[in-house]
Image: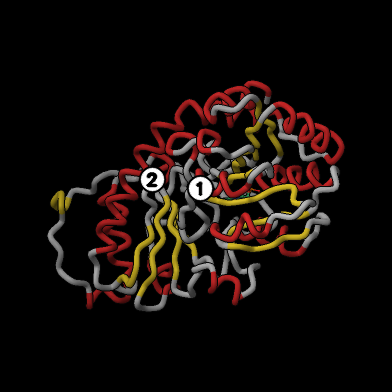
Amino acid sequence: MARFETALARLEGTESAVAFASGMAALSACLLARGAQGLRHVVAVRPLYGCSDHLLDAGLLGTEVTWVDPAGIAAAIRPDTGLVMVETPANPTLAEVDLRAVARSCGTVPLLADNTFATPVLQRPAERGASAVLHSATKYLGGHGDVMGGVVACDEEFARALRQVRFATGGVLHPLAGYLLLRGLSTLPVRMRAASATAAELARRLAADPRVARVHYPRIGGAMVAFETHGDPHAVIAGVRLITPAVSLGSVDTLIQHPASISHRIVAEGDRHSSGIGDRLLRMSVGLEDVEDVWRDLDQALDGGPAGRGAHRARPAAHGDVPAGVSASAAAGGPVPVPGPGGR
Ligand SMILES: *Cc1c(COP(=O)(O)O)cnc(C)c1O
């Protein structure tokens, strides 16, 4: 675990890092550590990962949240504000915030940036003024959908407070998970680059496709693509064959899910809509399969799956009829479901 923490701190460019049993345990520790100092107020920007939104909104850990747009951060800060929290690119809309500008509006209040989607390969929030960088290590850091963990990269002073909470509340990373996460880091840049190249190409094709109303793909890139369909988004999910309908993300296999009914179901409908999470939005975590294989599957799913094949438009296959390849993990039986209480 210590070696994973040291490696992650170096990747994020921070003094220290503290690992936890999950991303949610890591966020809980941040809130508890600040709350213990009497700083229970949090200013946060939507959208956030569904459970992060819920944890803040429900005040389960004694925190009180003020939801704002990035432009409203400075005005929302109070004497008891302990944290400003943003996620960029955000789950699930991939909306980006300007971290430098946000950090400036925080003044002396620490800025916590969830960097799960970008990873330090694409973005290092501490260089842009974030005081603490949060990861669900369950996602890209582990990278194979078979380990749960979380980590906060920060200065040593905040790290000490986080370790104290971790010690007292039991959100400790399992040693085997620490081993798997450290091993995952050694392939992180290669996985991120490969999956991002595929995701960027899929985003380009989706954006040019008349069956798709809108595509969300971050300027900084990454392996997540979100898109809105003209038709029933559930029909697309029902139609995929190679892509796995599943929550979580950041694994070697391409996963697709419907945020409004799965990962962000716990967020109230009005709050979902006002933060851009529409009912036709689909979120796709692009894996390491060949881009042509994923596209072929998406293409037929957008036509309504195998049942809708009669309506399938003729398309020139980029590489003829030769299957472009199957990912090693699909050949080994597909993704391993990540255990957990709810949608990730
Ligand atoms: C999954 C996720 C979390 C929560 O992490 P767990 O490891 O599943 O507890 C937090 N933030 C983001 C952006 C996530 O995608």
Q: Give the mark nearer the N terminus: 2 vs 1.
A: 1
Q: For the residue marked with disc 2, what is the amino acid?
A: Ile
Camera sees residue 143: no
Residue 171 at x, y percent in the picture: 77, 40
Q: Circles 2 and 1: CB distance less than 8 Å?
A: no
| Residue 340 in the figure: left or right of residue 89 | right
| Residue 256 in the figure: left or right of residue 43 | left
| Residue 190 in the figure: left or right of residue 25 | left
Task: Residue at 41% x, 36% y: name it.
Answer: 191
Q: For the residue marked with disc 1, what is the amino acid?
A: Ala
The label shown at residue 101 is 1
| Of residues 339 and 170, the one drawn nearer to the viewer in this rendering | 170
Q: Which residue is mark 2?
A: 220
User: Which secondary structure, mark 1?
Assistant: helix
Question: Is 1 situated above or below 257?
Answer: above
Question: Is 234 situated above or below 331?
Answer: below
Query: Which corner quadrant holds the C terminus?
Result: bottom right
| Of residues 81 and 85, the one drawn nearer to the viewer in this rendering | 81
